[in-house]
Amino acid sequence: MSTDSDVESGLSAAEKRIAQMLTRLRRDNDLTLSELSEKTGLSESYLSRIENLKAAISIAKLAKLADAFVVPITMFFVDEGSEARCIFTPKGKGTKVRLRGRHGIDVRFVANSLRGRMMEPFFADVASAERGASMQSHEGDEFIYVVRGKCRFFYGTEMIDMNAGDSIYFDSGIQHRVEPVDRRPCEILSIVTSRDFTFHGNMARLLNE
Protein backbone atom coordinates (compact mmCIF):
# COMPACT_ATOMS: atom_id res chain seq x y z
CA MET A 1 0.00 0.00 0.00
CA SER A 2 1.49 3.34 -1.12
CA THR A 3 1.69 6.34 1.20
CA ASP A 4 1.69 10.08 0.53
CA SER A 5 5.44 10.14 1.08
CA ASP A 6 5.80 7.42 -1.56
CA VAL A 7 3.84 9.57 -4.02
CA GLU A 8 5.95 12.63 -3.26
CA SER A 9 9.20 10.74 -3.69
CA GLY A 10 7.92 9.43 -7.00
CA LEU A 11 7.21 12.89 -8.43
CA SER A 12 9.72 14.23 -10.90
CA ALA A 13 11.44 17.59 -10.43
CA ALA A 14 9.23 18.99 -13.22
CA GLU A 15 6.04 17.76 -11.50
CA LYS A 16 7.11 19.35 -8.22
CA ARG A 17 7.90 22.62 -9.99
CA ILE A 18 4.43 22.62 -11.63
CA ALA A 19 2.78 22.07 -8.23
CA GLN A 20 4.74 24.98 -6.76
CA MET A 21 3.79 27.23 -9.70
CA LEU A 22 0.11 26.35 -9.26
CA THR A 23 0.31 27.23 -5.57
CA ARG A 24 1.93 30.57 -6.37
CA LEU A 25 -0.67 31.38 -9.04
CA ARG A 26 -3.54 30.59 -6.68
CA ARG A 27 -2.11 32.82 -3.96
CA ASP A 28 -1.32 35.63 -6.42
CA ASN A 29 -4.98 35.51 -7.49
CA ASP A 30 -6.14 35.56 -3.85
CA LEU A 31 -8.13 32.36 -4.39
CA THR A 32 -8.94 29.74 -1.78
CA LEU A 33 -8.80 26.08 -2.73
CA SER A 34 -12.61 26.07 -2.58
CA GLU A 35 -12.86 28.98 -5.02
CA LEU A 36 -10.36 27.39 -7.40
CA SER A 37 -12.35 24.16 -7.22
CA GLU A 38 -15.48 26.03 -8.33
CA LYS A 39 -13.64 27.65 -11.26
CA THR A 40 -12.11 24.39 -12.51
CA GLY A 41 -14.48 21.60 -11.48
CA LEU A 42 -11.57 19.86 -9.75
CA SER A 43 -12.19 18.75 -6.17
CA GLU A 44 -10.78 20.81 -3.32
CA SER A 45 -9.15 17.73 -1.79
CA TYR A 46 -7.44 16.88 -5.10
CA LEU A 47 -6.12 20.43 -5.47
CA SER A 48 -4.79 20.29 -1.91
CA ARG A 49 -2.98 17.03 -2.65
CA ILE A 50 -1.40 18.60 -5.75
CA GLU A 51 -0.11 21.59 -3.79
CA ASN A 52 1.22 19.37 -1.03
CA LEU A 53 3.05 17.15 -3.53
CA LYS A 54 0.85 14.18 -2.69
CA ALA A 55 -0.58 13.62 -6.17
CA ALA A 56 0.56 13.99 -9.75
CA ILE A 57 -1.48 16.05 -12.22
CA SER A 58 -2.57 15.07 -15.72
CA ILE A 59 -2.23 17.31 -18.77
CA ALA A 60 -6.03 17.56 -19.08
CA LYS A 61 -6.40 18.81 -15.50
CA LEU A 62 -3.41 21.13 -15.84
CA ALA A 63 -5.12 22.62 -18.91
CA LYS A 64 -8.20 23.42 -16.79
CA LEU A 65 -6.05 25.20 -14.25
CA ALA A 66 -4.18 27.13 -16.95
CA ASP A 67 -7.53 28.34 -18.33
CA ALA A 68 -8.65 29.42 -14.85
CA PHE A 69 -5.49 31.49 -14.38
CA VAL A 70 -5.55 32.81 -17.99
CA VAL A 71 -2.05 31.55 -18.71
CA PRO A 72 -0.77 29.26 -21.47
CA ILE A 73 -0.20 25.66 -20.40
CA THR A 74 3.28 25.90 -21.91
CA MET A 75 4.42 28.20 -19.10
CA PHE A 76 4.44 25.20 -16.74
CA PHE A 77 7.09 23.48 -18.87
CA VAL A 78 9.53 26.37 -19.23
CA ASP A 79 12.73 26.18 -17.23
CA GLU A 80 12.74 29.37 -15.14
CA GLY A 81 16.49 29.54 -15.46
CA SER A 82 16.22 29.93 -19.23
CA GLU A 83 13.20 32.23 -19.33
CA ALA A 84 12.91 34.25 -22.53
CA ARG A 85 13.51 38.01 -22.31
CA CYS A 86 11.66 38.71 -25.54
CA ILE A 87 8.47 37.34 -27.13
CA PHE A 88 7.66 37.46 -30.84
CA THR A 89 4.03 36.80 -31.77
CA PRO A 90 3.21 36.36 -35.47
CA LYS A 91 0.15 38.10 -36.92
CA GLY A 92 -3.08 36.45 -35.79
CA LYS A 93 -1.35 34.24 -33.23
CA GLY A 94 -1.39 34.35 -29.44
CA THR A 95 -3.39 32.76 -26.63
CA LYS A 96 -7.11 33.02 -27.34
CA VAL A 97 -9.51 33.13 -24.40
CA ARG A 98 -12.91 34.58 -23.53
CA LEU A 99 -12.67 36.99 -20.63
CA ARG A 100 -15.47 37.28 -18.05
CA GLY A 101 -17.40 34.15 -19.00
CA ARG A 102 -19.80 33.39 -21.85
CA HIS A 103 -21.10 36.97 -21.92
CA GLY A 104 -17.60 38.39 -22.06
CA ILE A 105 -15.29 39.26 -24.92
CA ASP A 106 -12.93 37.24 -27.11
CA VAL A 107 -9.32 38.32 -26.65
CA ARG A 108 -5.91 37.24 -27.89
CA PHE A 109 -3.00 37.63 -25.48
CA VAL A 110 0.32 38.24 -27.19
CA ALA A 111 2.84 38.21 -24.34
CA ASN A 112 1.36 36.15 -21.52
CA SER A 113 4.08 33.48 -21.64
CA LEU A 114 6.61 36.08 -20.48
CA ARG A 115 6.66 36.11 -16.70
CA GLY A 116 7.42 39.13 -14.53
CA ARG A 117 6.17 41.63 -17.13
CA MET A 118 4.68 44.97 -16.12
CA MET A 119 2.23 45.24 -19.04
CA GLU A 120 -0.45 42.93 -20.46
CA PRO A 121 -1.03 43.60 -24.18
CA PHE A 122 -3.88 41.87 -25.99
CA PHE A 123 -6.16 42.21 -28.99
CA ALA A 124 -9.92 42.14 -28.40
CA ASP A 125 -12.76 41.35 -30.80
CA VAL A 126 -15.19 44.07 -29.69
CA ALA A 127 -18.08 42.61 -31.71
CA SER A 128 -17.96 39.46 -29.57
CA ALA A 129 -18.95 41.42 -26.46
CA GLU A 130 -22.53 41.37 -25.26
CA ARG A 131 -24.26 44.69 -25.95
CA GLY A 132 -25.07 46.57 -22.79
CA ALA A 133 -22.73 44.45 -20.66
CA SER A 134 -22.04 45.77 -17.18
CA MET A 135 -19.30 48.32 -16.65
CA GLN A 136 -16.02 47.04 -15.21
CA SER A 137 -13.14 48.55 -13.31
CA HIS A 138 -9.77 47.20 -12.23
CA GLU A 139 -6.55 48.39 -10.69
CA GLY A 140 -4.10 50.34 -12.82
CA ASP A 141 -4.04 52.13 -16.17
CA GLU A 142 -5.13 51.02 -19.64
CA PHE A 143 -4.41 52.09 -23.22
CA ILE A 144 -6.75 51.24 -26.11
CA TYR A 145 -6.00 51.66 -29.81
CA VAL A 146 -8.64 50.90 -32.45
CA VAL A 147 -6.99 48.69 -35.08
CA ARG A 148 -10.01 48.45 -37.38
CA GLY A 149 -13.70 49.24 -37.36
CA LYS A 150 -15.60 51.45 -34.96
CA CYS A 151 -16.54 51.03 -31.33
CA ARG A 152 -18.15 52.95 -28.51
CA PHE A 153 -16.21 53.54 -25.31
CA PHE A 154 -18.04 54.22 -22.05
CA TYR A 155 -16.06 55.77 -19.20
CA GLY A 156 -17.89 56.77 -16.05
CA THR A 157 -20.70 59.00 -17.36
CA GLU A 158 -18.92 59.73 -20.66
CA MET A 159 -19.50 58.05 -24.05
CA ILE A 160 -16.90 58.34 -26.81
CA ASP A 161 -17.18 57.01 -30.39
CA MET A 162 -13.83 55.65 -31.55
CA ASN A 163 -12.71 54.88 -35.11
CA ALA A 164 -9.72 53.07 -36.60
CA GLY A 165 -6.56 54.95 -35.60
CA ASP A 166 -8.09 56.51 -32.47
CA SER A 167 -6.61 55.77 -29.07
CA ILE A 168 -7.34 56.50 -25.43
CA TYR A 169 -5.32 56.19 -22.22
CA PHE A 170 -7.23 56.11 -18.95
CA ASP A 171 -7.33 55.26 -15.25
CA SER A 172 -8.97 51.83 -15.31
CA GLY A 173 -10.09 52.20 -11.71
CA ILE A 174 -13.08 54.11 -13.19
CA GLN A 175 -15.98 51.98 -14.46
CA HIS A 176 -15.67 51.43 -18.22
CA ARG A 177 -16.57 49.20 -21.14
CA VAL A 178 -16.23 48.98 -24.92
CA GLU A 179 -19.05 47.86 -27.22
CA PRO A 180 -19.47 47.53 -31.00
CA VAL A 181 -21.52 49.91 -33.11
CA ASP A 182 -24.38 48.13 -34.93
CA ARG A 183 -22.60 44.79 -34.32
CA ARG A 184 -20.01 45.70 -36.95
CA PRO A 185 -16.53 44.14 -36.75
CA CYS A 186 -14.09 46.05 -34.59
CA GLU A 187 -10.68 45.06 -33.25
CA ILE A 188 -8.77 46.91 -30.56
CA LEU A 189 -5.31 46.63 -29.08
CA SER A 190 -5.42 47.06 -25.31
CA ILE A 191 -2.45 47.36 -22.97
CA VAL A 192 -3.15 47.03 -19.25
CA THR A 193 -0.77 47.74 -16.42
CA SER A 194 -1.01 47.76 -12.65
CA ARG A 195 -0.04 51.06 -11.07
CA ASP A 196 1.98 49.36 -8.35
CA PHE A 197 3.34 46.66 -10.69
CA THR A 198 2.41 43.87 -8.30
CA PHE A 199 0.25 41.79 -10.62
CA HIS A 200 3.29 40.58 -12.62
CA GLY A 201 1.30 40.13 -15.81
CA ASN A 202 -1.36 38.00 -14.12
CA MET A 203 -4.48 39.13 -16.00
CA ALA A 204 -6.91 37.07 -13.94
CA ARG A 205 -5.76 38.79 -10.77
CA LEU A 206 -5.69 42.26 -12.33
CA LEU A 207 -9.28 41.97 -13.57
CA ASN A 208 -10.37 40.45 -10.27
CA GLU A 209 -12.34 37.73 -12.03
Image: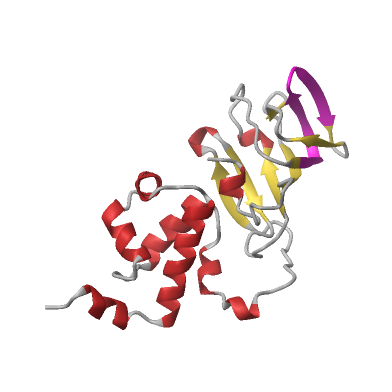
164 or 64: nearer the viewer: 64
* Residue drawn at the location 66% of the way across and 53% of the way down: 198
From what the image shows, is residue 172 above or below residue 181? below
Residue 91 x, y percent position in the rendering: 74, 59
Asked if residue 143 is among those painted magenta in the image, a careful observer would answer yes
Write the start and end of the magenta stretch as one range: 142-162
* Residue 131 relative to residue 76: left or right: right
- Can residue 147 be seen from the camera position used here? no
Residue 182 in percent (x, y) is at 70, 23
Q: Is residue 6 left or right of residue 135?
A: left
Whether the magenta-drawn stretch holds residue 55 is answered as: no
Residue depicted at x 75% and y 27%: 153
Specify the principal SS of the magenta part.
Answer: strand
Look at the image and tell me whether residue 176 can be seen.
yes
In the figure, residue 154 lies in which quadrant?
top right
Q: Position of residue 194 (x, y in %)?
A: 71, 47
| Whether residue 149 is situated above or below residue 23 in the rendered picture | above
In the displayed structure image, the side of residue 43 where residue 14 appears, left or right: right
Q: Position of residue 200 (x, y in %)?
A: 65, 57
Residue at point 73%, 63% (across, down): 90
Quick one: 143 or 187, which is closer to the camera? 143
Q: State the residue at coordinates (37%, 61%).
A: 61
